[in-house]
Amino acid sequence: MKFNNKHIIRSAAAILLCVGLASCSQDELDLGTGQTLPDGKYPLKITASVEGLASRSDSKDSWNDDDLIAVKIYPSNGVAFPVTGKYFLNTDGSVKRTQNPLSWPHIVGTVKAWFPYLNENEVKTVSLANQSEGIVDYDFLIAESKDRKYSETIDLVFKHQMAKVSTTLVRGDGISEEEFATARLYYSGFTSADFSETGVTADKIGQITPDSVNTAILAPREMTGQPLITVKLTVNVNGHLIDKTLTYTASSADDLIAGNHKRYTVTVQKDRLQVNPPVSASWTDVVVGDDLNSKPWVFNVVFKDNFAISKDSRKDMVFSENVLNVEEFRDSTANHLEVAGNEFSITCTKYKGITPKMHLWVGKSGVDEMTESSEIVDGGEKFTFKFRLRSNEVSLAYKEFSGHTTQPGDYYYSDG
């Protein structure tokens, strides 16, 4: 068969024009999944949510404004596009702005994203050992949407890669309210985890301190025959205070599974723990004790009368959330603190050359503890005093020093 040269030229030009996307329809374009698209011509369009509802591990109902996710396109030919996009989100999961915005390199491919943002091949090691300040920074989420087209808006549904555990403690028979108030719960699990584009890895086992309602984010792990829940408390045995450590050993029902939230009810006896089987819960469930015995014991912490605290100093103090009578104390109508639970903190700021100091005045040595730390913030010095109480006979001394910082060896008289 013979072809006219002009006909051949016209056909070649039409093919080139189609490949260049100047005049082809979508059906004409979709000739093969590995077909290359022109660079930057078709930007990636996404929305982001978390499986179940648009929430995060801190139980908020939406993303935080400016949350940053990493996004990558994997073409169907199996060759990863070597760019990781930075996408900043609005609270509803829509894209607010981008850095390194992605465009489709091929017609069909897989879109993968992860939070928090990590670059390609980057590994972030997160310590899980102490979650007492809250659990928002311990979760890792991944979304993957396969066989999607360049012309679509990709709805990225993020899935939790960590497990979540919550426990409600209940006072058992034969244990007093004051003994129960000393109970502190810990979990056993991986004390750190490595987050990367490929997921979560972990290998070191140890003790994990949960948040204030005994909730923790843990790395996935098989649990059969392993300790999971530990409760430490002080009990009175024939007039003697004895520290006890009670441990629950797990079964396969307690396996820590990615995206799974398990809730336990643990009855604390003087010599053992009674643990109910775990209940699967929504990731965003908040632990609330249904039994009156699960409510924290309220400690009464008294400031010594001969250490007067001015109203300005009271207003400057910042208390942890479990201090119940903050406003009354700031109004100078109370000289004591009502604390739910046996741990709390007070933060003060150095001003006008005045340095605030605390002293654990009355308490049981080796049982009631106070630690002090300081940091420079906005050019000033901030002091944080953390307390752990095991007795209900505790008094504090507060004093302000001008030009003098308390040193080891200083001696306090009864008037300060």
Image: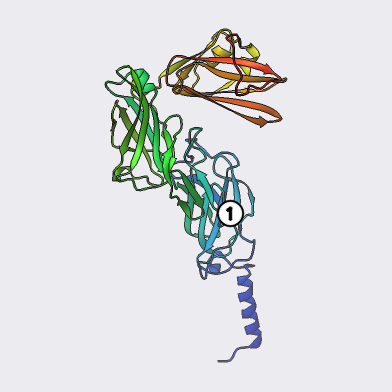
Q: Which residue is drawn at the image coordinates 56% and 51% (left, top)?
A: 118
Amino acid type of the residue that numbered disc 1 sits on in the rendered structure: Asn
Q: Dot 1 surroundings within 10 Å: few (below 14), some, or many (20 or more)?
A: some
Above or below, comparing residue 395 to residue 80 in the picture: above
For this rendering, which residue is in front, 381 or 218?
381
Quadrant of the image containing the C terminus:
top right
Task: Give how far across and how far down residue 246 sits, in percent.
Answer: 33, 32
Quadrant of the image containing the N terminus:
bottom right
For this rendering, which residue is in front, 238 or 192?
238
Can you name the residue that lies furthest to the bottom here?
Answer: 1
Above or below, comparing residue 326 to residue 229 in the picture: above
For residue 284, say whether it is visible.
no
Residue under label 1:
119
Location of residue 376 (image quadrant): top right
Q: Which residue is drawn at the image coordinates 52% and 70% (left, top)?
A: 31
Badge count: 1
Q: Secondary structure at mark 1?
A: loop
For residue 101, say whether it is visible.
yes
Above or below, comparing residue 391 to residue 193 in the picture: above
Task: Give how far across and how far down residue 322 sits, in percent.
Answer: 49, 22
Location of residue 295 (image quadrant): top left
Above or below, comparing residue 56 to residue 327 in the picture: below
Location of residue 304 (image quadrant): top right
For this rendering, which residue is in front, 260 or 36?
260
Task: Give how far across and how far down residue 242 sits, in percent.
Answer: 35, 24
What's the image's color scheme?
rainbow
Can you name the residue that lies furthest to the front here?
Answer: 409
Task: Give how far across and how far down residue 268 sits, in percent.
Answer: 31, 27
